[in-house]
């Protein structure tokens, strides 16, 4: 297999950096970590929905959503709202919106721009993904252990995070569905992922479509 030269790799990195510079990092509001439905009620109401209104999520709702998904819940230790094997935290959440693609940086609780391109339609094979306000893409980073271990850990971590999102959406009256039907090669290219990054799942979030 042909490997890119140092020069071509630099050009790709430089172009990606320029594209990201057209967007600015987004500082999210402080997450609201009180309130919401009781856990047992949220579990009862958890459901997959595949019809979404096009209304954008407010900055506060997006902030709360990302914190619930994979935020830092114990600042003194840096531990998160979802577990990870040996606390390696080898999962990244990318946030695809109409404004562009961002990576969630949990420690700073902000969105780091990746590209101004609207990649929502590439996050799945169903038509609704291209118009729903938010698609989260769960990306694992290569860590320790065998390839089999990494695949198992990546799947488990994405499952933990996606269930947090499900429960948050059930609590807040949002619609969501997690998805594995993705053209991963095309999406990874659009996201400018490196060879050590693997797309595991994607999850669509929005307000329920009015009947």
Image: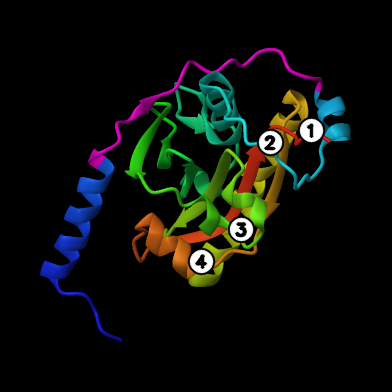
Q: Secondary structure at mark 3?
A: helix
Q: Secondary structure at mark 2?
A: loop
Residue located beneath label 4 in the image: 184
Does the stretch in magenta take in 36? yes
Instruction: Name the residue rendered at 57%, 30% in the picture.
Output: 56
Residue located beneath label 1 in the image: 210
Q: How many marks?
A: 4
Q: Residues within 10 Å of mark 1 (few under 14, many from 20)?
A: few
* The image quarter in which residue 191 lies: bottom left
Does the stretch in magenta take in 61? no
Query: In the displayed structure, would residue 27 be above or below residue 24?
Result: above
**Do tag 3 and tag 4 residues touch (Cβ < 8 Å)?**
no
Tell me which label, 4 or 2, sits earlier in the chain: 2
Residue located beneath label 2 in the image: 53
Query: In the displayed structure, would residue 29 be above or below residue 18?
Result: above
Mark 4 → mark 2, Cα distance in angstroms = 26 Å
Query: What is the magenta range?
Result: 21-38
Q: Which image quarter is the C terminus in?
A: top right
What type of secondary structure mainly makes up the magenta span? loop
Mark 1 → mark 2, Cα distance in angstroms = 7 Å
Instruction: Select label 1 or label 3 by which is in front.
Output: 1
Q: Secondary structure at mark 1?
A: loop
**Do tag 2 and tag 3 residues touch (Cβ < 8 Å)?**
no
Tell me which label, 1 or 4, sits earlier in the chain: 4
């Amino acid at each position: 297999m042909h490997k890119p030269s140092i020069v071509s790799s630099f050009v790709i990195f430089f172009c990606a950096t320029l594209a990201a510079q057209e967007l600015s990092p987004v500082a999210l509001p402080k997450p609201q970590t009180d309130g919401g439905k009781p856990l047992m009620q949220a579990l009862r109401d958890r459901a997959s929905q595949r019809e979404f209104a096009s209304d954008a999520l407010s900055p506060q709702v997006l902030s709360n959503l990302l914190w619930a998904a994979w935020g830092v819940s114990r600042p003194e230790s840096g531990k998160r709202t979802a577990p990870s094997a040996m606390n390696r935290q080898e999962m990244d959440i990318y946030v695809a919106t109409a404004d562009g693609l961002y990576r969630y940086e949990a420690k700073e609780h902000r969105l780091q721009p990746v590209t101004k391109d609207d990649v929502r339609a590439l996050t799945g094979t169903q038509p609704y993904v291209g118009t729903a306000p938010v698609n989260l893409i769960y990306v694992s980073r290569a860590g320790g252990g065998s390839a089999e271990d990494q695949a198992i850990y990546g799947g488990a971590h994405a499952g933990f995070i996606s269930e947090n999102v499900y429960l948050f959406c059930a609590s807040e009256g949002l619609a969501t569905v997690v998805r594995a039907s993705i053209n991963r090669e095309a999406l990874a290219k659009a996201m400018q992922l490196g060879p050590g990054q693997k797309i595991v799942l994607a999850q669509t979030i929005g307000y329920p479509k009015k009947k």
